[in-house]
């Protein structure tokens, strides 16, 4: 099985991995690596992280772009702001500016804007350099993404100036980034809760044995909070406020203490902004629906896992990564629901980007004998 | 919960060599929590918990898992997580070990900001600029206007060249050449056949018209000088044919003398006569073809042109050591 999985690794097109015996090719690759500036990009729905080889995570910004519609007849569109700056504009823009999130559910929703955003980020990473290199880029994609969605990501990265584009599945990158022993003949289960999707995967011998992706993530939590507040308080709050509520008092499991937060929103009946107080139990109630989606996905994964690997997972536990892992007591919820130990990886937000970076390093070191499949 | 361990205290206590497990066990016992109860709360087997409390990491999975278990355990007991994990990292050097899949060889990675890369890049840019300057200078001096079929050119050049390079040898005995030429025909007859028969006819016919046909005559002189070598003979006979024909139509003689190396390109009005290539010092050329001639002469200072024996001044045409002009011997002789 081990040798099989190695033989079946897909060589990236355009690379020279087919001729590992060829010394010239090896030399050429080394020469190229000498000057190359490789990036691993976690192109997420909420945040985009860039890991530069040898430097660590060099960029962590929201995946938001503000587009300005130039005035006058025939006025074109231009990028007004990207990243943090654009996120501050979300929901606060005048008529001629629209702040949009070009990624939705882990995949590209607006191709050109995503390309512009990537271009901006790649340039930002190379800002201080004399020459802007055309880097090799490894992009993490949700395991549930279709061929069309993957191609869109690949072309968008190529359009943003990448010399070569590799794709890696997010759970694999998350597992490598979390430090799981993915090359062992033992099952490791990883649950990556991102902004748009949650991915659960069982990995053994450098390959994904089972993977499932549900379109539930941080965004759905925010939506659930907005809906809850509208339903129970008759008040409309924005996405940014919902996110703040989630971060400050959101929890996935009833705790000992009840925390409160004061928020302001537009009262739907009066049409006037009003202030009111929310507590953590209410938010817990609001989050029940999206959380059950994640729990369901984990349970389904455990059901579908071959028994040997399931036993390994039961013995060692489930590892949580991604921004969703920062939701208070989400590990306890999963522990109670599955009866298995649940561990939160160190620095869960950057796991995918770091894992992608390591994959890039391995790509150079091991060349054709890739330890995992990279499209 | 009577957690007496404050943040800083904890750090100090846990960084002891005994490891975090024993400390956690002591805390658990002080809270009267049974191991079985903790096992249920943490969803970990009792054996695992015992290994964890004994700081015996060999029986536990990897560092990632051990850190996770310790974090959960510390949280259960209400102890700050940070010091526990620090103590673990201090007690177990393996924890800081990066997983084996990671292979980092970043020491000899050079990025675009590196001095060497900058140097190489600027070197390449300078090299390109230098190359383009050299090319441009060369373009000014010796424009490469390659036209016409190369076979014709070479044939014409070799024909005249051979005739002329050996003309130098025979130049002193020029008057005798004519005399010898007739004699030579008869001598060469057994070898030459038809070709040699034609040559003397032309030379005798052209002989009356002056020096233009000299090349033809010289050819035979050459043949005489070189003895009866067949190869030379046939070549020179060819040369005679080529330069002999147009020479008959003109009455002007143009001679070019080179006192230094020079690249020249000369083309006559009909386009059939061409001379292109470099010429060494000491070469003297007599032009055939139909005038006027279009001339491009490199290193023009080393070139002298005689029209009917008179020096033709090319200095007004020299631009940057190259002379470009059209020479019509008729207008010059008037």
Image: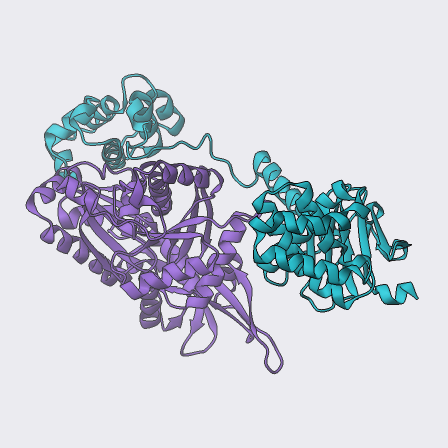
Chain colours: A purple, B cyan
Q: Position of residue B245 (x, y in %)?
A: 69, 64
| Residue B7 x, y percent position in the rendering | 38, 29
Between B312 and A247, the one nearer to me in the picture = B312
- Return the residue found at the far top: B17
Quadrant position of the N terminus of chain B in the picture: top left
Can you give x and y, in whole percent of width and height, for residue A293 in the image? 21, 60
Q: Is residue B122 left or right of residue A30?
A: right
Residue B321 appears anywhere in the view: yes
* Res. B62 image quadrant: top left
State the residue lying farthest toward the bottom. Answer: A73
* Image position of B110 with respect to B160: above or below: above
Instruction: Establish if A328 lies above or below B212.
Output: above
Q: Which of A60/A275 is in front?
A: A60
- Is residue A57 shown above or below A303? above
Residue ID at (32%, 28%)? B97
Point 40% across, 26% down: residue? B8
């Amino acid at each position: 099985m081990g040798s099989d999985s190695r033989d079946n690794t897909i060589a990236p097109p355009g690379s020279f991995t087919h001729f590992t015996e060829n010394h010239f090719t090896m030399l050429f690759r080394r020469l190229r690596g000498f000057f190359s500036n490789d990036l691993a990009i976690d192109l997420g729905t909420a945040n985009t992280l860039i890991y530069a080889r040898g430097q660590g995570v060099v960029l962590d910004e929201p995946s938001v772009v503000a587009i300005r519609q130039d005035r006058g007849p025939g006025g074109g569109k231009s990028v007004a702001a990207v990243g943090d700056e654009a996120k501050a504009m979300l929901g606060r823009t005048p008529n001629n500016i629209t702040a949009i999130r070009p990624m939705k559910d882990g995949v590209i929703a607006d191709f050109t804007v995503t390309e512009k955003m990537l271009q901006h980020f790649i340039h930002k990473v190379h800002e201080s350099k004399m020459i802007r290199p055309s880097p090799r880029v490894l992009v993490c994609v949700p395991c549930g993404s279709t061929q069309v969605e993957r191609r869109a990501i690949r072309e968008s990265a190529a359009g943003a100036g990448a010399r070569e584009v590799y794709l890696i599945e997010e759970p694999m990158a998350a597992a490598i980034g979390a430090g799981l022993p993915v090359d062992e003949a033992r099952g490791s289960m990883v649950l990556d809760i991102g902004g748009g999707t949650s991915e659960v995967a069982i990995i053994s011998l450098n390959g994904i044995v089972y993977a499932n992706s549900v379109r539930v993530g941080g965004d759905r939590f925010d939506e659930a909070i907005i809906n809850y507040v509208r339903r129970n308080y008759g008040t409309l709050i924005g996405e940014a406020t919902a996110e703040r509520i989630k971060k400050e008092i959101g929890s996935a499991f009833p705790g000992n203490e009840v925390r409160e937060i004061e928020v302001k929103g537009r009262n739907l009946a009066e049409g006037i902004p009003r202030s009111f107080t929310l507590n953590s139990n209410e938010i817990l109630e609001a989050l029940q629906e999206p959380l059950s989606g994640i729990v369901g996905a984990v349970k389904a994964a455990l059901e579908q896992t071959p028994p040997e690997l399931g036993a390994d997972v039961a013995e060692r536990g489930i590892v949580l990564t991604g921004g969703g892992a920062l939701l208070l007591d989400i590990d306890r919820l999963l522990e109670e629901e599955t009866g298995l130990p649940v561990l939160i990886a160190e620095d869960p937000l950057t796991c995918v980007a770091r894992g992608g970076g390591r994959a890039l390093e391995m790509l150079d070191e091991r060349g054709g004998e890739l330890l995992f499949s990279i499209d | 919960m009577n957690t007496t361990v404050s943040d800083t205290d904890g750090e100090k206590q846990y960084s002891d060599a005994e490891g975090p497990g024993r400390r956690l066990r002591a805390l658990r016992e002080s809270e009267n929590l049974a191991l079985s109860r903790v096992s249920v709360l943490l969803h970990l087997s009792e054996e695992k918990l015992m290994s964890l409390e004994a700081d015996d990491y060999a029986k536990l999975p990897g560092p990632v898992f051990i850190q996770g278990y310790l974090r959960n355990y510390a949280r259960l007991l209400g102890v700050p997580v940070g010091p526990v994990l620090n103590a673990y990292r201090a007690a177990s050097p393996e924890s800081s070990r990066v997983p084996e899949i990671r292979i980092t060889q970043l020491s000899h990675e050079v990025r675009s900001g590196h001095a060497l890369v900058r140097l190489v890049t600027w070197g390449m840019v300078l090299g390109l600029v230098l190359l383009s300057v050299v090319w441009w200078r060369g373009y000014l001096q010796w424009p490469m206007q390659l036209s016409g079929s190369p076979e014709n050119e070479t044939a014409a050049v070799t024909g005249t060249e051979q005739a002329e390079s050996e003309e130098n040898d025979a130049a002193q005995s020029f008057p005798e050449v004519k005399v010898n030429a007739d004699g030579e025909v008869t001598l060469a007859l057994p070898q030459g056949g038809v070709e040699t028969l034609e040559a003397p006819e032309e030379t005798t016919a052209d002989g009356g018209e002056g020096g233009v046909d000299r090349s033809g005559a010289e050819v035979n002189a050459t043949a005489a000088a070189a003895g009866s070598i067949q190869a030379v003979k046939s070549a020179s006979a060819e040369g005679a044919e080529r330069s002999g024909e147009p020479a008959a139509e003109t009455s002007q003689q143009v001679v070019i003398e080179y006192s230094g190396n020079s690249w020249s390109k000369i083309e006559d009005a009909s386009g059939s006569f061409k001379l292109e290539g470099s010429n060494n010092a000491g070469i003297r050329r007599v032009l055939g073809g139909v005038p006027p001639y279009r001339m491009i002469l490199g290193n023009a200072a080393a070139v002298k042109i005689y029209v009917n024996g008179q020096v033709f001044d090319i200095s007004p045409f020299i631009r940057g050591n190259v002379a470009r002009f059209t020479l019509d011997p008729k207008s010059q002789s008037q």
